[in-house]
Amino acid sequence: MEFPFDINQLFSERVTILDHTLVAGRKSAGRPDLQALITTVIDEIGRASAKAQQLTAPITSASKLQSQRHQVYLLKDGERNGGHGVVVGFLKVGCKKLFLLDRQGVHIEAEPLCVLDFYIAENVQRHGYGLELFDFMLQHKNLEPVLMAYDRPSIKFLSFLAKHYCLTQSVPQVNNFVVFEGFFPNRTAAQLRKVPLKKQDGEIKPYSLMEREVIRQEQRALPWPFAPPHTPQRSVSSQCSHSLSVGSSPSGAPLRALRDNRDKSPQSTLAERCRARRTSSLNRAQQGFP
Ligand code: ACO
């Protein structure tokens, strides 16, 4: 995404982390002029993300970021636009108190880091930028993706998680957050708390208020992308196999992987491929490669 000002002057790093202060490094601290430009960028990318997800209103805006304890990881490509740089995309995360159901259907209270918004500009999707940004955030937070919760992930995002992190088996929830197999066993007792069935002030609401929920109210007539609202509770393995079967990667890698492993079960092939990808992307990130 191009802007009529110098992105490199605004964001010196390839990935900039923004929070409620809207300050990008020392340069923009105490500079209302630069902060106004940062506001423009956040509002613009937030709108683009909402449009891409067919939401009626953005989940991400500068004013929302200022009022919430969320973080935006913003990725730029400093070479493009005649050296002025372009914004490639962003990832917004934040902790949310959630009432989740474990595999046995027991209510568990947890406050995981959640992916709240994620967008890569249309013209550069499927070029590995999403993975670069996501891996950066994981390294920064020192976290495994299985320990995170995902706020109403889109089909593209589910496919992304399946491909890069082998996250295919979700644990059914009664809210729009998705967590995957491994979320509960990998947490310490201190991070999880079993919730009693009744609270003094009435029934527990096993959901969390979320930005998407407000937007969803407005969209009630519309199916959540191409499926009813309970879709996030399903296993996402069908989307994974769809993504593999269409073979739409520019590299054709998934199809090749399947063809090369005809004698193996699909599950073992997928697991091996994901492990290999994860290891290689972590290595790349550790070596500072994009
Ligand atoms: N259709 C299906 N899968 C897709 C698509 C697509 N159009 N685009 C990306 N993916 C998935 C696939 O698994 C793909 O692998 P493949 O090409 O081999 O099939 C993989 O992502 C590619 O990985 P990257 O190139 O690293 O991902 P990308 O840079 O495209 O970023 C993202 C992924 C952020 C989901 C991007 O596609 C996007 O912005 N989509 C539109 C907005 C969106 O849906 N955001 C998620 C909202 S939900 C939330 O934020 C909680």
Image: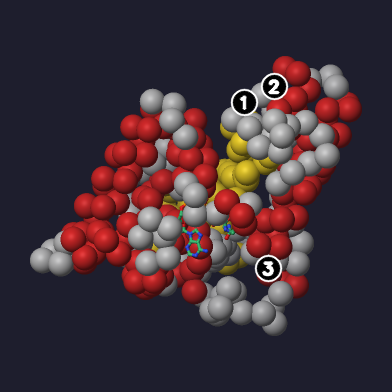
Query: Residue 154 placed where, x, y %?
Result: 54, 64
SS of the residue at dot 1? loop
Asked if disc 1 and disc 2 are in contact, CB closer than 8 Å, the reply is yes
- What residue is drawn where x is 62% and y is 26%? 13
Q: Residues within 10 Å of mark 3 (few under 14, many from 20)?
A: few
SS under mark 3: loop
Q: Which residue is mark 2?
A: 25
Task: Indicate the position of residue 289 as horizontal and vertical percent values.
Answer: 43, 30
**Of the two numbered discs 3 and 1 in the rendering, the one whose residue sits closer to the viewer:** 1
Mark 2 / mark 3, whichever is N-terminal: 2
Q: Earlier in the sequence, mark 1 or mark 2?
A: 1
Disc 2 CB within 8 Å of nearest ligand 1 atom: no
Amino acid tagged 1: Glu
Above or below, 262 against 122 in this view is below
- The front one of 281 and 215 is 281
Residue drawn at (56%, 57%), measured in percent from left and top?
Answer: 151
The answer to whether residue 70 shows anywhere in this view is no
Residue 96 lies, with reference to residue 32, above or below; the image says: below
- As drawn, which residue projects farthest toward the right? 33
Secondary structure of the residue carrying tag 2 is loop
Q: Amino acid at mark 3?
A: Gln
**Outermost residue toward the bottom in this view:** 221
Disc 2 packing (10 Å; few <14; some 14–19; many ≥20):
some
Q: CA distance from mark 3 to mark 1?
A: 30 Å
- The local crowd at label 1, few if under 14, some if 14 to 19, many if 20 or more residues have their Cα within 10 Å, is some
Residue with the mark numbered 1: 13
Q: Horizontal placement of 276 versus 83: left or right?
A: left
Question: Circle 3 is placed at which residue position?
Answer: 54
Callout 2 amino acid? Gly
